[in-house]
Amino acid sequence: MTERIERHLYDVVVIGAGGAGLRAAIEARLAGKRTAIISKSLFGKAHTVMAEGGAAAAMGNANSRDNWMVHFRDTMRGGKFLNNYRMAELHAKEAPERIWELETYGALFDRTKDGKISQRNFGGHEYPRLAHVGDRTGLEMIRTLQQKIVSLQQEDHAETGDYESRIRVFAETTITELVLSGDRIAGAFGYYRESGQFLLLEAPAVVLATGGVGRSYKVTSNSWEYTGDGHALALRAGATLINMEFLQFHPTGMVWPPSVKGILVTESVRGDGGVLRNSDGKRFMFEYVPDVFRKQYADTEEEADRWYSDPDNNRRPPELLPRDEVARAINSEVKAGRGTKSGGVFLDVSTRMPAEQIVRRLPSMHHQFKELADVDITKEPMEVGPTCHYVMGGVEVDPDTTAALGTVRGLFAAGEVSGGMHGSNRLGGNSLSDLLVFGKRAGEHAAAYVSALDHRPKLRPADVEAATDTALAPLSREGGENPYTLQQDLQAVMGDLVGIIRREGELTDALKRLQELKQRVAKVGAPGGRRYNPAWHLALDLRNMMIVSECTARAALEREESRGGHTREDFPAMSAEWRQVNLVCSLDEAGDVRLDRKALPTMPPELLELFDRGELSKYMTDEELA
Amino acid sequence: MTDRHFRVWRGDESGGEIRDYDVEVNDGEVVLDIIHRLQATQAPDLACRWNCKAGKCGSCSMEINGKPRLGCMTRMSTFGDDETVTITPLRTFPVIRDLVTDVSFNYVKARETPAFAPPSLAPGDYRMQQVDVERSQEFRKCIECFLCQNTCHVVRDHEENKAAFSGPRYFIRAAELDMHPLDARSDRKEYAQASQGLGYCNITKCCTEVCPEHIKITDNAIIPLKERVVDKRYDPLVWLGRKILRRDQVPGAAPAPVGEGGIPSRGVDGKPLGTPAPAGSSMAPSSTAGVTDVASGLGDGHVRLPEAPPVGADGRMDVAELLATNAGGPSPFGDDQQFPLAQVTYRPPEPDKD
Ligand SMILES: Cc1cc2nc3c(=O)[nH]c(=O)nc-3n(C[C@H](O)[C@H](O)[C@H](O)COP(=O)(O)OP(=O)(O)OC[C@H]3O[C@@H](n4cnc5c(N)ncnc54)[C@H](O)[C@@H]3O)c2cc1C
Ligand code: SF4
Ligand code: SF4
Ligand code: FES
């Protein structure tokens, strides 16, 4: 069959229109490169829109003692020292600039009394640090970046008469394959969801900004877009993934009604004073403060309550521990039979602040519970439980340039799809700022890479034909298996066997089942035509979800310790030896996942000095400290 | 758990029909859950947009029993126990397939609306008071579900008005920038009147009724935009002031500004652009000079806007229509109509239209 394939020529192709993708595209366009932005959903609807709490940046507006070093320290502590120190350093240093820049694009953050950007408390952050707009910060960020892109298009229009002369958005378009020439990126191949027609974007540099993998879990705060496409594209192109065993389960997802199970209840509820109680009415978090955090967290309710008004002289309430701790605590309470009927615990603001203050500070939570659960959070507590939220693992990148490691050249990654920055656990609010900091760097370095090339890599027609055949296969497969059933089965395996608490036996079992599923996925079929056919789209996404799930399960089996977003019941302690190891996934010739151990880069002395020795000794081996 | 009767429009731009389905419904479910169940069981290729399932992204807009709604925020418990639920695509936009419509109209209008013009302040030096940003923040809550655009009678069933009319979503954008404490442009209202088709709007408030974010589109954006346009245009002092002070700035008097790469910048109609906004900062690659200027030639009264005669034949000024009891004149739906509309019969596009 001969397929007509639309061809486009660009300098930089950015896959993903979330915060990271849009920021990268802006930078590439400002560097004078012809840039394409690809998104599976409509422009302005990427997953970033759902972020609620805020973007962390040490601007010091709320507490002048805050600075990049404190932020760096918090990030490393949150990630249990497994973070790539250089990424954490760059992030802490550059986040304020990136946030201020958003104001020049038209963003309107909430303000302090003296007219600066207001900052709020969040779990794991020592000072109020999250720039926010009520609880719809992600919406503000994506709209601001979207409007900045429109404004660049307007500039181009004024100059060339064409809005799309330098930057074009391909909305509702899915990339299914990266096309290489030798080890260099030569383009990206995909289809328009609307029409099912194929397109080929020829470009020497591709920026991956495709977000996460949460759709492999049933209870998740993530949208359908999160099928790990970027992770899988990178692997297939010869790049490597790190830290795939670390998944963040957000402690507070809705648990009732069943159809909304997993939808996020923002951490700002706790940051602004909300408390967790079990079915006996007890504020149970005080019993779950781990030793490494004892010094920073209160041990009585009185001290915890005083902290909201006097943070300098009191320690923080334990509700604001990093997410992995709170998620595990809720999990144990429910297991011990102190949960609610629907398997959660209570999160209460109704007894903590006046109703109008709740409505003003948490408008979208108030709205969400009212509309979806018929619960008025100013009068009743919410019911919450852990939900799969964020993947710390991702494409292994060079910290300064965001270029993917492995064998491929010309591939860059930023945002949730990249790995290393957050170590074993991400602090709330660190993602939105991560998107901006590394999105900008990705755009800048992709542009520089293109400028340095003396010729454009040429792609081979055979590769494009192969990509076409793979994409069309599910449509023509008579009697193939239903993709929705396969997705449910995958979600069951991952949720039951590779969930919050993991055990060796279950992980081995999971790997066996994933192999079986892989064979079934190879025979998936999608009835219907090519025009906007969701069954076909899911059938193609399944392939990516499979690879990524396999990486997670294999790495989870390998890492014999508990740390951040990876908890092994059979190895409950954190191990200083394992802290020195990153688990790196790649694909071998046969297309199977291969796992290697790699040493973590060592922190230079000037950064080590930011911590006291006593603290470091909880994480590091004696030789490292010597 | 019960089985309920659903009717869903299936088809594409060449035509289609309402099909009947019986689907299981559980406690606490929303319409979007039902559509997902249909996809997983009876109609795998049923096309429908969604993303967040939490009312945050504005993807799942559809018409449910004739009312424009978000599928993910419409609980099944809001319908009677054996009420049939009919789901059809947005009517104002061309159907692509099933419940998915071509909403590119909105993105075109977004691109035509002049962007934020940054003041000459360094990043980090912006100072604004909470009370001053709140008014614009209300409009920035917009999730771009386009339900208001779909509902507005100016374009609903009136293809011919689409070229000249931006719609309520972009009126609130204009209002948002107009109220932005630091936006460097001052002609947002005039622009809305002259180029966005604000004049077509007769304040029926249908857009406000359907907005899932409860943005007071008419009261807080459209009416203030209209009022201020009226003030400025009818105030003889303002008018006189403009005439005198701005004479030196008539189009063509200033040399054409130079754009990137030495290419002279031109506006849409070939007129030279206004002076680019001063580059805001030292943070080099991120700050570009001369944002947008699509609305060139309209800046601060370079050009007089089309105006009605300031006084009527009786020598008096017209009473602003805003003061009338039914502001905006009679509703095209009839003045006793309640919104959202209860009884609307959906007519799918004719079979062989193009
Ligand atoms: C409910 C919720 C609340 C959150 N709150 C916060 C918060 O308060 N603070 C914080 O810092 N973080 C928060 N996060 C995390 C943060 O929002 C995400 O990590 C971040 O938005 C990811 O952004 P991104 O740019 O990497 O990708 P996304 O915004 O997810 O964008 C991914 C893009 O890639 C596109 N894409 C994917 N695959 C393909 C493909 N194959 N072809 C073409 N395009 C593709 C998608 O269409 C999309 O446009 C929250 C997350 C959730 C789910
Ligand atoms: S008030 Fe009526 S006419 Fe005006 S924009 Fe809204 S729906 Fe359209
Ligand atoms: S103004 Fe309201 S109805 Fe209109 S697009 Fe925005 S959120 Fe939707
Ligand atoms: S799915 Fe996002 S608003 Fe309904």
Image (spheres, coloured by chain):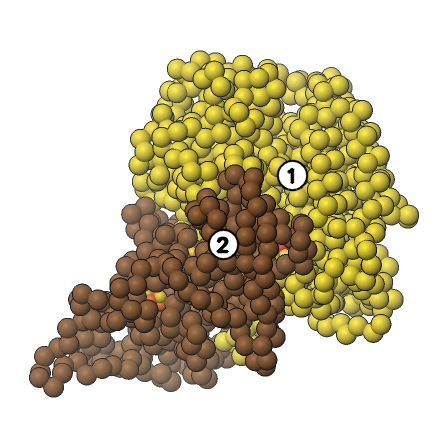
Chain colours: A yellow, B brown
Q: Position of residue A61 (x, y in %)?
A: 41, 38
Mark 2 and mark 1: Cα distance apart in space: 29 Å
* Disc 1 target residue: A218
SS class of the residue under badge 2? loop
What residue type is disc 1 on?
Lys
SS class of the residue under badge 1? loop
The disc label shown at residue B84, or none: 2
Q: Give the residue drawn at x 78%, y 29%.
A: A507
**Looking at the figure, which quarter contains the C terminus of chain A?**
top right
Instruction: Give me the chain letter of mark 1.
Output: A
Q: Position of residue B279 (x, y in %)?
A: 45, 63
Residue toward you, B352 or A573: B352
Q: Nearer the viewer, mark 2 or mark 1?
A: 2
Mark 2 CB lies closer than 8 A to ligand 4: no
Furthest-right residue in this view: A590
Q: Residues within 10 Å of mark 2 (few under 14, many from 20)?
A: some
Q: Give the residue drawn at x 83%, y 50%.
A: A522
Q: Is residue A407 left or right of residue A103?
A: right
Tag 2 and tag 1, C-beta contact below 8 Å: no
Q: Give the residue drawn at x 22%, y 82%.
A: B308
Instruction: Give me the chain letter of mark 2.
Output: B
